[in-house]
Image: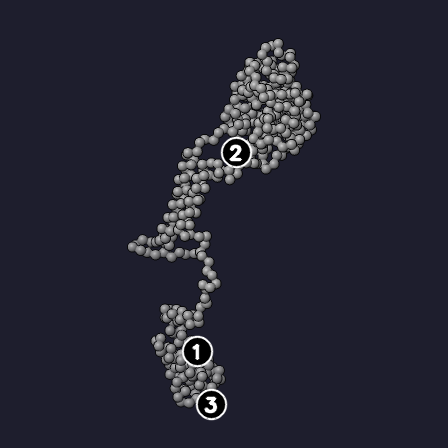
């Protein structure tokens, strides 16, 4: 499609450039919206580090653990999506203190997977996660401990040390194994070497324990023994990994529960949906404010979604005279007098040819000569009128003369039979 180009003052102007003022309002709205978004982004505080994030390199992230496992040849995955799904080919499953608690059905499914031969590394669980506590019988002790060292109570960590300092882990909580009779303490808080042989102290002050469940095994850890970047780097918690990976085949599948940990499929503390982003972030507030101001601006300017509808009462049909006047004006502006003259001349010759049996395509002189010998013969006055009309239509007639000649054509066609 070609657009019309006009030249004003030596400058070439297109319709788009000529109507540039019509784009000022949309451009102003877009500019205001961009400024508000930029201000919101600058004023937004940096996000808090997400604890136990597999891709985070801060102290409480798990990037070091993930890279270590991948370097050893394991296939590291994470759960997610709209439902909790435990991969069928998983060999080791990590569960950290989460935002979303396990349902009874999910906890039963997890226990069934362990009974079938899977290995579960369970950090915690928190007191609100009653389904996991009921499924495996281990919970955290509410009483905090202040012992200065921890001792390996069972020879389950051949690569580890017999005794670790208190700073080896950051939590002061311990595991309550009273409802898990088959759980065996692996590491326990002690105050002296004499406590190493006291099984009662080991059961009440355990910070790591192993529990056989069917054909599988569950490793229980307090939240301070969680293999984060800080604990792997500064406190050598990697010495627990060889024992934890003992039941995982080489190149096996290790899965981290991100579904319950981050709450990506439900509305939790994390931004999970567009609605969360709009309602709970400064950038979302700026977006809502900009949209609201744009709607108010359009309403104040009388803008609507499309042109106003015309009712049936407001419509009327065109009159015949209006059409005739319009066509006459078009012909007048186009200066098509010659075409009209030829049209009326042909109309006269065709009408007379049908009445008198002559050919209408003959030249005017030959047509008049043939018409004079038709029977019954035309009168001299009629023949003179036909000759005068054809002669007038063949010349350069004006508007008024053309109207008179057209009326003469109608009169001749009515009188000559």
Q: Are marks 3 and 1 in contact (CB under 8 Å)?
A: no
Mark 2 vs mark 1, foreground winner is 2
The residue indicated by pointer 3 is: 376
The residue indicated by pointer 1 is: 346
Dot 2 falls on a residue whose secondary structure is loop
Viewed as shown, does residue 32 lie left or right of 99?
left
Dot 1 falls on a residue whose secondary structure is helix
Q: Position of residue 369 (x, y in %)?
A: 42, 86
Q: 316 above or below 20?
A: below
Viewed as shown, does residue 383 lie left or right of 220?
left
Label 1: few (<14), some or many (≥20) within 10 Å?
Answer: some
The residue at 44%/85% (across/down) is 415
The residue indicated by pointer 2 is: 270
Label 2: few (<14), some or many (≥20) within 10 Å?
Answer: some
User: Which is more N-terminal, label 1 or label 2?
Assistant: 2
The residue at 45%/84% (across/down) is 414
């Amino acid at each position: 499609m070609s657009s019309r180009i006009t030249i004003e003052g030596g400058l070439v102007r297109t319709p788009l450039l000529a109507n540039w003022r019509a784009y000022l309002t949309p451009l102003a709205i877009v500019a205001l919206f961009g400024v508000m978004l930029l201000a919101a982004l600058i004023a937004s505080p940096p996000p808090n580090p997400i604890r136990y994030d597999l891709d985070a390199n801060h102290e409480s992230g798990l990037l070091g653990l993930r890279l270590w496992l991948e370097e050893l040849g394991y296939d590291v995955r994470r759960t997610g999506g709209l439902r909790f799904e435990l991969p069928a080919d998983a060999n080791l499953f990590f569960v950290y203190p989460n935002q979303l608690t396990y349902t009874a059905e999910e906890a039963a499914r997890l226990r069934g997977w362990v009974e079938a031969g899977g290995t579960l590394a369970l950090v915690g669980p928190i007191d609100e996660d009653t389904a996991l506590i009921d499924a495996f019988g281990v919970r955290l002790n509410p009483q905090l401990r202040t012992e200065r060292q921890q001792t390996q109570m069972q020879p389950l960590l051949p690569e580890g040390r017999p005794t670790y300092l208190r700073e080896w882990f950051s939590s002061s909580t311990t595991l309550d194994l009273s409802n898990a009779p088959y759980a065996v303490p692996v590491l326990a808080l002690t105050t002296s070497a004499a406590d190493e042989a006291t099984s009662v102290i080991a059961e009440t002050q355990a910070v790591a324990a192993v529990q056989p469940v069917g054909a599988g095994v569950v490793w229980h850890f307090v939240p301070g023994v969680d293999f984060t970047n800080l604990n792997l780097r500064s406190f050598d918690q990697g010495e627990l990994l060889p024992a934890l990976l003992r039941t995982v085949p080489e190149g096996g599948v290790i899965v981290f529960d991100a579904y319950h940990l981050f709450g990506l499929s439900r509305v939790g503390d994390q931004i999970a949906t567009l609605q969360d982003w709009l309602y709970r972030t400064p950038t979302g507030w700026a977006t809502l404010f900009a949209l609201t101001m744009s709607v108010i601006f359009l309403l104040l300017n009388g803008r609507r979604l499309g042109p106003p509808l015309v009712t049936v009462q407001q419509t009327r049909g065109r009159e015949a005279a209006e059409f005739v006047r319009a066509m006459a004006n078009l012909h007048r502006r186009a200066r098509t007098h010659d075409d009209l003259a030829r049209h009326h001349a042909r109309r006269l010759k065709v009408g007379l040819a049908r009445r008198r049996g002559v050919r209408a395509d003959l030249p005017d002189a030959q047509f008049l000569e043939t018409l004079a010998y038709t029977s019954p013969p035309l009168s001299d006055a009629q023949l003179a009128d036909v000759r005068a009309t054809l002669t007038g239509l063949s010349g350069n007639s004006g508007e008024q003369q053309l109207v008179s000649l057209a009326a003469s054509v109608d009169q001749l066609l009515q009188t000559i039979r």
